[in-house]
Image (cartoon, rainbow, N blue to C red):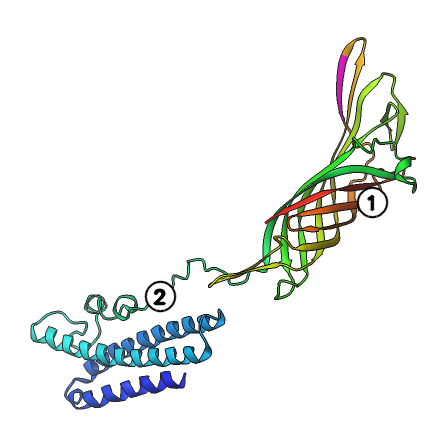
């Protein structure tokens, strides 16, 4: 900034010396108005120089130019602005003299005061930094491209096998058909990189809609009796018996693994394309619905029933999850720490295994 100040001071001193004698004969008020006009020119050029210097510094930050090149460009810009001040003030003086000699309206009245309307017309071609100096002033309302975006948005989908661990046993003790029970999820997630590089861990969080479906075996259905829900045999031959529970949860995962770097002239991005990743975390949320669906024949007629009751399922759900994969596709597992039912003899925790896809 020393060079900038030096050139501006040189220009100001040269202008002051060339106009000192002429100003002795100018009325005090008019002299002050002319000083104001000249000062406006200086302020505009200084502001234009500031914009140019900021643009040069941005090029250094983005590694488009070296520090030495930046210093050279700043010196050139400072010289240009100093000359602009000198030329514009000379134009101002000549234009004032021309207007006064031809009885044209100037921005200074007979008392030496500045007139706003005439000022705007008079300096239409002089005090516009954009048109006269060639500087492009960035529109502050125009959205700039962020050089490094650490938080990105994703759409996630998961689906696969669903079952339950009952009474602390194994999946073999489950009353559900493991091949016909399923789960699926769809969610909106944000992923935030915790560090600067692409190898930094990330956190993933958002909002996910879950559906856990259980296909019942042995011709049994769920029966709710007050605060108790039990599995009981059904009187007809069931073609289908399933319980469907839907949840709205907030997932939270820590993700690890390298990311691929995409580097452009004005921005850098990190993506998971083709890279190994692993995520561990969990979720918590609310149950949004419970429904039992039955299909059977009665007196030769096909009957379909959809029974919407809470079946004493827990209104609050929470659990843990993990995924491991490459790029957008992962092997995914989750386990509900919260019990599926409350206040009943069936003590079970949901468990799911499937495929997860994340699209950014």
Identify the image quadrant of residue 199. bottom right
Image point (83%, 45%), residue name: 338
Position of residue 155 relative to residue 98, above or below, is above
Q: Is residue 212 visible?
A: no
Left or right of 173? Residue 151 is: left
- CA gap between label 1 and label 2 equals 58 Å
The span shown in magenta is 302-307
Find disc 2 in the rendering and name its residue.
137
Image point (32%, 85%), residue name: 7
Secondary element under disc 2, as helix, strand or loop, is loop
Q: Main secondary structure of the magenta part?
A: strand
Lower position in the chain sequence, tag 1 or tag 2? 2
Find disc 1 in the rendering and name its residue.
338
Residue located farthest toward the top when viewing the structure as drawn: 299
Where is residue 332 drawn, in percent x and y? 74, 46
Left or right of 347? Residue 123 is: left
Identify the image quadrant of residue 139. bottom left
Taking depth in this image into account, of 131 and 358 the one nearest to the observer is: 358
Where is residue 70 drawn, in percent x and y? 42, 77
Specify the quadrant that holds the N terminus.
bottom left
Image point (42%, 58%), residue name: 142
Position of residue 357 relative to residue 3, above or below, is above
**Tag of residue 357:** none
Residue located farthest toward the front when viewing the structure as drawn: 274
Left or right of 89? Residue 138 is: right
Left or right of 142? Residue 240 is: right
């Amino acid at each position: 900034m020393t060079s900038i100040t030096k050139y501006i001071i040189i220009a100001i001193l040269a202008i002051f010396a060339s106009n000192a004698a002429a100003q002795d004969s100018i009325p005090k008020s008019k002299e002050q108005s002319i000083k104001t006009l000249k000062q406006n020119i200086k302020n505009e050029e200084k502001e234009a120089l500031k914009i140019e210097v900021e643009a040069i510094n941005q090029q250094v930050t983005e590694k488009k130019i070296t520090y030495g090149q930046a210093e050279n460009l700043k010196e050139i810009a400072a010289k240009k602005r100093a000359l602009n001040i000198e030329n514009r003030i000379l134009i101002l003086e000549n234009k004032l003299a021309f207007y006064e000699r031809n009885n044209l309206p100037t921005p200074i009245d007979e008392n030496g005061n500045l007139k706003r309307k005439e000022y705007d017309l008079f300096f239409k071609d002089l005090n516009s930094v954009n048109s006269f100096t060639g500087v492009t002033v960035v529109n502050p309302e125009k959205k700039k491209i962020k050089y490094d975006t650490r938080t990105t948005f994703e759409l996630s989908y998961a689906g696969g096998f669903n079952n339950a661990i009952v009474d602390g046993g194994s999946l073999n003790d489950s009353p559900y058909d493991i091949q016909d029970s399923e789960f699926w999820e769809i969610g909106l997630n944000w992923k935030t990189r915790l560090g600067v590089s692409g190898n930094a861990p990330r956190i993933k969080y958002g909002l996910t809609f879950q559906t856990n479906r259980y296909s019942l075996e042995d011709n049994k259905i769920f029966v709710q009796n007050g605060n108790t829900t039990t599995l009981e045999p059904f009187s007809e031959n069931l073609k289908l018996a399933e319980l469907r529970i839907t949840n709205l949860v907030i997932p939270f995962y820590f993700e690890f693994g390298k990311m691929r770097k995409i580097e452009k002239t004005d921005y850098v991005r990190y993506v998971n394309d083709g890279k190994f990743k692993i995520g561990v975390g969990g979720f918590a949320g609310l149950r949004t619905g419970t429904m039992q669906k039955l299909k059977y024949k009665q007196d030769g007629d096909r009957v379909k029933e959809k029974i919407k009751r809470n079946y004493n399922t827990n209104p609050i759900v929470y659990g843990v999850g993990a995924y491991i994969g490459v790029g957008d596709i992962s092997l995914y597992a989750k386990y509900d720490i919260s019990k599926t039912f409350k206040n009943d003899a069936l003590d079970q925790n949901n468990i799911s295994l499937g495929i997860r896809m994340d699209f950014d």
